[in-house]
Amino acid sequence: MAKLYFYYGAMGSSKTANALMTEYNYAERGQKALLGKTNTDTRNGKYKIKSRIGLEKDCVLLSEICSMKDDRLKEYDAIIVDEIQFASADQIDFLARIVDELEVPVLCYGLRTDFQLNLFEGSRRLLELADEIKEVKTVCWCGKKAICNARYNEQGIVREGSQVLLGANDEYIALCRKHFMEGKLYKDS
Protein backbone atom coordinates (compact mmCIF):
# COMPACT_ATOMS: atom_id res chain seq x y z
CA MET A 1 0.00 0.00 0.00
CA ALA A 2 1.37 3.41 -1.00
CA LYS A 3 2.00 6.06 1.64
CA LEU A 4 2.74 9.76 1.90
CA TYR A 5 6.00 10.21 3.81
CA PHE A 6 7.42 13.36 5.39
CA TYR A 7 11.10 13.26 6.33
CA TYR A 8 11.99 16.49 8.12
CA GLY A 9 15.06 17.78 9.86
CA ALA A 10 17.03 20.88 10.69
CA MET A 11 19.54 22.40 8.27
CA GLY A 12 22.46 20.09 7.61
CA SER A 13 20.70 16.87 8.63
CA SER A 14 21.30 15.25 5.21
CA LYS A 15 17.71 15.43 3.99
CA THR A 16 18.76 16.07 0.39
CA ALA A 17 21.43 13.37 0.52
CA ASN A 18 18.78 10.96 1.81
CA ALA A 19 16.40 11.92 -1.01
CA LEU A 20 19.12 11.33 -3.60
CA MET A 21 20.12 8.00 -2.02
CA THR A 22 16.48 6.90 -2.01
CA GLU A 23 16.17 7.67 -5.72
CA TYR A 24 19.40 5.74 -6.33
CA ASN A 25 18.07 2.74 -4.38
CA TYR A 26 14.94 2.61 -6.56
CA ALA A 27 17.05 2.81 -9.74
CA GLU A 28 19.45 0.15 -8.48
CA ARG A 29 16.52 -2.22 -8.11
CA GLY A 30 15.26 -1.51 -11.62
CA GLN A 31 12.43 0.71 -10.46
CA LYS A 32 11.58 4.15 -11.75
CA ALA A 33 11.43 7.03 -9.27
CA LEU A 34 10.59 10.60 -10.25
CA LEU A 35 12.88 13.07 -8.50
CA GLY A 36 11.57 16.59 -7.98
CA LYS A 37 11.98 19.75 -5.97
CA THR A 38 9.91 22.82 -5.31
CA ASN A 39 10.19 25.78 -7.66
CA THR A 40 11.56 28.05 -4.92
CA ASP A 41 14.91 26.25 -4.61
CA THR A 42 17.09 27.61 -7.42
CA ARG A 43 20.45 27.53 -5.62
CA ASN A 44 21.95 24.83 -7.83
CA GLY A 45 19.98 25.58 -10.98
CA LYS A 46 16.35 25.15 -11.82
CA TYR A 47 16.52 21.41 -12.58
CA LYS A 48 19.25 20.16 -10.24
CA ILE A 49 19.21 18.77 -6.71
CA LYS A 50 22.54 18.92 -4.92
CA SER A 51 23.42 17.93 -1.37
CA ARG A 52 26.05 19.58 0.79
CA ILE A 53 28.26 16.48 0.50
CA GLY A 54 28.31 16.78 -3.29
CA LEU A 55 25.69 14.26 -4.42
CA GLU A 56 23.62 15.71 -7.25
CA LYS A 57 21.06 14.69 -9.84
CA ASP A 58 18.78 16.26 -12.42
CA CYS A 59 15.15 16.66 -11.38
CA VAL A 60 11.81 18.14 -12.35
CA LEU A 61 9.88 20.88 -10.58
CA LEU A 62 6.97 20.16 -8.27
CA SER A 63 4.78 22.43 -10.40
CA GLU A 64 5.49 20.11 -13.35
CA ILE A 65 4.65 17.03 -11.29
CA CYS A 66 1.35 18.65 -10.28
CA SER A 67 0.47 19.26 -13.93
CA MET A 68 1.21 15.69 -15.10
CA LYS A 69 -1.65 13.46 -16.19
CA ASP A 70 -2.47 10.41 -14.08
CA ASP A 71 -1.31 7.91 -16.71
CA ARG A 72 2.13 9.55 -16.73
CA LEU A 73 2.37 9.62 -12.93
CA LYS A 74 1.44 5.93 -12.77
CA GLU A 75 4.60 5.14 -14.77
CA TYR A 76 6.63 5.75 -11.59
CA ASP A 77 7.24 3.39 -8.70
CA ALA A 78 7.77 6.38 -6.38
CA ILE A 79 7.85 10.16 -6.40
CA ILE A 80 10.53 11.89 -4.31
CA VAL A 81 10.33 15.63 -3.62
CA ASP A 82 13.04 17.74 -1.96
CA GLU A 83 12.67 21.14 -0.24
CA ILE A 84 9.00 20.31 0.35
CA GLN A 85 8.62 23.04 2.96
CA PHE A 86 8.23 25.51 0.07
CA ALA A 87 5.22 23.64 -1.38
CA SER A 88 1.73 25.06 -1.17
CA ALA A 89 -1.04 23.25 0.71
CA ASP A 90 -2.69 22.55 -2.67
CA GLN A 91 0.48 20.90 -3.94
CA ILE A 92 0.63 18.69 -0.85
CA ASP A 93 -3.03 17.77 -1.39
CA PHE A 94 -2.14 16.80 -4.98
CA LEU A 95 0.70 14.57 -3.73
CA ALA A 96 -1.71 12.93 -1.27
CA ARG A 97 -4.08 12.26 -4.17
CA ILE A 98 -1.25 10.52 -6.06
CA VAL A 99 -0.82 8.20 -3.08
CA ASP A 100 -4.52 7.55 -2.49
CA GLU A 101 -5.84 7.31 -6.04
CA LEU A 102 -2.85 6.18 -8.08
CA GLU A 103 -1.23 4.10 -5.32
CA VAL A 104 2.22 5.59 -5.95
CA PRO A 105 4.29 6.29 -2.80
CA VAL A 106 5.40 9.90 -2.35
CA LEU A 107 8.46 10.68 -0.21
CA CYS A 108 8.89 14.31 0.82
CA TYR A 109 12.02 15.82 2.36
CA GLY A 110 12.31 19.25 3.94
CA LEU A 111 12.46 21.57 6.90
CA ARG A 112 9.70 21.59 9.49
CA THR A 113 10.14 25.17 10.68
CA ASP A 114 11.79 28.39 9.59
CA PHE A 115 14.38 30.56 11.38
CA GLN A 116 11.66 31.89 13.73
CA LEU A 117 10.44 28.36 14.57
CA ASN A 118 7.23 28.84 12.52
CA LEU A 119 5.93 26.04 10.34
CA PHE A 120 6.27 26.40 6.58
CA GLU A 121 3.01 25.96 4.63
CA GLY A 122 4.12 22.72 2.96
CA SER A 123 5.41 21.28 6.21
CA ARG A 124 2.22 22.18 8.08
CA ARG A 125 0.08 20.41 5.49
CA LEU A 126 2.32 17.34 5.52
CA LEU A 127 2.11 17.16 9.31
CA GLU A 128 -1.65 17.13 8.85
CA LEU A 129 -1.79 14.54 6.04
CA ALA A 130 1.32 12.35 5.98
CA ASP A 131 0.94 8.64 6.68
CA GLU A 132 4.45 8.52 8.14
CA ILE A 133 6.47 11.38 9.65
CA LYS A 134 10.12 10.77 10.41
CA GLU A 135 12.82 13.06 11.73
CA VAL A 136 16.21 13.14 10.04
CA LYS A 137 18.42 14.04 12.99
CA THR A 138 21.45 16.25 13.35
CA VAL A 139 23.24 17.79 16.31
CA CYS A 140 23.98 21.22 17.70
CA TRP A 141 27.58 22.25 18.36
CA CYS A 142 27.01 21.16 21.98
CA GLY A 143 26.08 17.60 20.99
CA LYS A 144 22.35 17.84 21.79
CA LYS A 145 19.75 17.20 19.12
CA ALA A 146 19.39 20.23 16.84
CA ILE A 147 15.80 21.19 16.01
CA CYS A 148 16.19 24.90 15.21
CA ASN A 149 17.32 26.52 11.97
CA ALA A 150 19.13 29.65 13.08
CA ARG A 151 19.68 32.32 10.46
CA TYR A 152 22.74 34.38 11.27
CA ASN A 153 25.01 37.14 10.07
CA GLU A 154 28.09 38.89 11.44
CA GLN A 155 26.02 40.34 14.32
CA GLY A 156 24.67 36.96 15.45
CA ILE A 157 21.29 35.24 15.16
CA VAL A 158 18.76 37.02 12.94
CA ARG A 159 15.29 37.09 14.51
CA GLU A 160 13.34 39.08 11.89
CA GLY A 161 12.94 39.03 8.14
CA SER A 162 11.39 37.19 5.25
CA GLN A 163 10.48 33.56 5.92
CA VAL A 164 12.33 32.42 2.80
CA LEU A 165 15.99 33.28 2.31
CA LEU A 166 17.83 30.60 0.40
CA GLY A 167 21.17 29.83 1.92
CA ALA A 168 23.41 27.17 3.33
CA ASN A 169 26.13 27.01 5.98
CA ASP A 170 27.01 30.64 5.24
CA GLU A 171 23.65 31.86 6.56
CA TYR A 172 22.14 29.04 8.64
CA ILE A 173 23.22 26.75 11.44
CA ALA A 174 21.31 23.98 13.19
CA LEU A 175 21.06 24.53 16.95
CA CYS A 176 19.38 22.89 19.92
CA ARG A 177 16.47 24.91 21.34
CA LYS A 178 18.49 26.12 24.34
CA HIS A 179 21.29 27.63 22.26
CA PHE A 180 18.84 29.00 19.72
CA MET A 181 16.93 30.82 22.48
CA GLU A 182 20.21 32.04 24.03
CA GLY A 183 21.47 33.17 20.62
CA LYS A 184 24.65 31.15 21.09
CA LEU A 185 26.03 30.12 17.69
CA TYR A 186 29.25 28.55 18.94
CA LYS A 187 30.76 27.27 22.17
CA ASP A 188 32.58 30.50 22.87
CA SER A 189 30.05 32.97 21.50
Image (tube, rainbow, N blue to C red):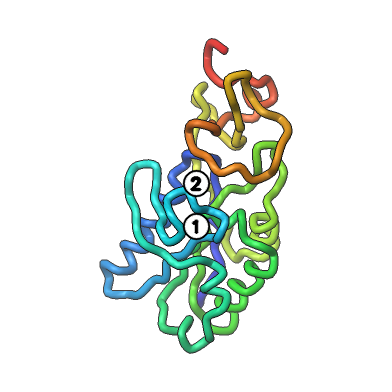
Residue 42 percent coordinates (x, y): 50, 53
Disc 1: which residue: 82
Quadrant into which the C terminus falls: top right
Vertical placement of residue 48 versus 31, above or below: above
Q: Amino acid at mark 2?
A: Val
Residue 133 percent coordinates (x, y): 58, 56
Packing grade of label 1 (10 A; few <14, some 14-19, many >=20) is many
Disc 2: which residue: 136
- Distance of label 2 from label 1 (alpha carbons): 13 Å
* SS under mark 2: loop
Residue 104 percent coordinates (x, y): 49, 77
Name the residue rendered at 52%, 21% in the picture: 142
Residue 158 image-quadrant placement: top right
* SS under mark 1: strand
Residue 35 image-quadrant placement: bottom left
CB under 8 Å between discs 2 and 1 = no
